[in-house]
Image: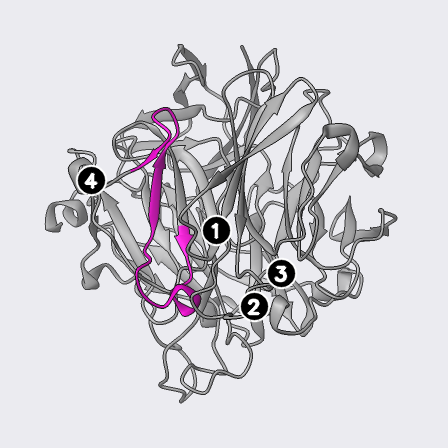
Amino acid sequence: MIRFLVAFIGLSSTAIADPMFENRSDALPEHTYAGGWDHFVGGGVAVFDCNADTLPDVFVAGGTNPAKLIRNDGEFAFTDMPVPELTGVTGAYPLDMDADGLMDLFVLRVGPNVVLKGGTDCTFTNATAAFGIPQTDQWTTAFTAWWEGDRPTLAIGNYVDQTDPEGPFEACDSNAILRPIPEGYEAETLTPGFCPLSMLAAKDARGRPTLRISNDRHYYVKGGYEQMWDIADQRFLGAEDGWQNVALWGMGIASRDLNGDQRDEVMLTSMGDQLLQLAQSDGTYQAAPYAIGTYAQRPHIGDDGRPSTGWHAEFGDVDNDGLADLFIAKGNVDQMPGMATRDPNNLLIQKDDGTFVEMANSAGIATTDRSRGAALADFDQDGLLDLIVTNRRAPLELYRNVTNNTGHWLRVKLEQSGGNPDAIGAVVSFETDMGAQSQQVVVGGGHAGGQALPLHFGLGDSDGVTLVVTWPDGFETRHQTDDVNQTVVIRR
């Protein structure tokens, strides 16, 4: 593990200023994620472009309030847009389900889930029946998707079975895999279920497409653990695969290659320790050493010494120095007395030696509402990742990244023909004098929300790269890019 840390030394030479954000929350329409115990969790945000103007738009869960669609009009001006009214929404994920070039939304609910079909100019219609999505009255809190053919396979994570008279403890519901059939989708039960709050389909440390499920120990109590399900073999990994069971209060998943070896490290948020798992060359994972600085187990401001509660986690290079940083949304479930009640969000900035340093307070984003979902996205297209955060029983927050003297950057958008037009499952990688980077194109992860935007890379001093794209079927192409600070569209 020490080798993992020192491997980063010398990757970045740009003299980057400390990150700084300005609060632009007043630009957003008023919105709050609200509700009782079935909305203690959730509160996700989906970020995507719904009108082809390259500006990231937002769909945000409302709990007992209606979910909201917010159009980005540029220069941090936003408009509240009409959308089919949906309550009971815990989160949503954008994906193009019918390959028509328009983003759809899979909406997670306490109750039957919904597919909103995207139209032009940020219009949406309820197309759940048209897509043939099986309807159940379950409490959905996790989602991911992958392509095995022309239409996506969907994984649905269901939380506590509210109909169980012996619940809620040890009453975790079953999960489901929705597979495309000519008439729509057919549900396959995926058990055991241990109360998932995040799912992610991605290549694991073995290089195989795998469904990772992060589960909440608060309700499975005993006998449960984090799960990995091999997509091709359709089986859970066990000790024979080198998989070591980990039990935690799993809330969110973030995945990113942190040392350029094209194996993603995985961040798992929880109550107390936030667990970073380091991908090993033998296909297994090891817990990061405490000295790496990512455990973020207690509030970093104030005098509350009780443990933190982590929710959405997301890697992103906020200063474009070529090193991925980490945002974690924090907040008490509601009034849990054993956990911190004023629990500031984290902004962990990666340093040249691979360690992370807390900078949320100095950056101006260490708010202490009960945060849930979030997204790092460049809302004004200036090359810097901004931040949106949803809160339970408190308004949405929006922050503009105004960091000075940042490095170069590049956005990469992949396109291909067929049923998977956004090349979900592809990997983009490159190597410069400052080191190697790679990112996977995925749907899922986070906490109850994700994004469908071009991949963002910070480049530091580098002013050109040769991009290597490994497409979902394994075919590899190379693309020389001499102009930086732009979006590169690569079409297969």
Q: Which mark is residue 43?
A: 3
Q: Element under label 4?
A: loop
Q: Amino acid at mark 4?
A: Thr
Image depth: mark 2 or mark 1 in front:
1
Residue 314: tell me if it is visible. Answer: yes
Q: Which residue is mark 4?
A: 284
Q: Is residue 68 left or right of residue 414?
A: right
Q: Which mark is residue 198?
A: 1
Q: Are marks 2 and 4 in contact (CB under 8 Å)?
A: no
Q: Are marks 4 and 3 in contact (CB under 8 Å)?
A: no
Asked if marks 3 and 1 touch (Cβ < 8 Å), the reply is no
Magenta segment includes 360: no
Q: Which residues are magenta?
A: 214-236
Residue of label 2: 371
Label 1 sits on what residue type? Ser
Residue located farthest toward the front when viewing the structure as drawn: 165
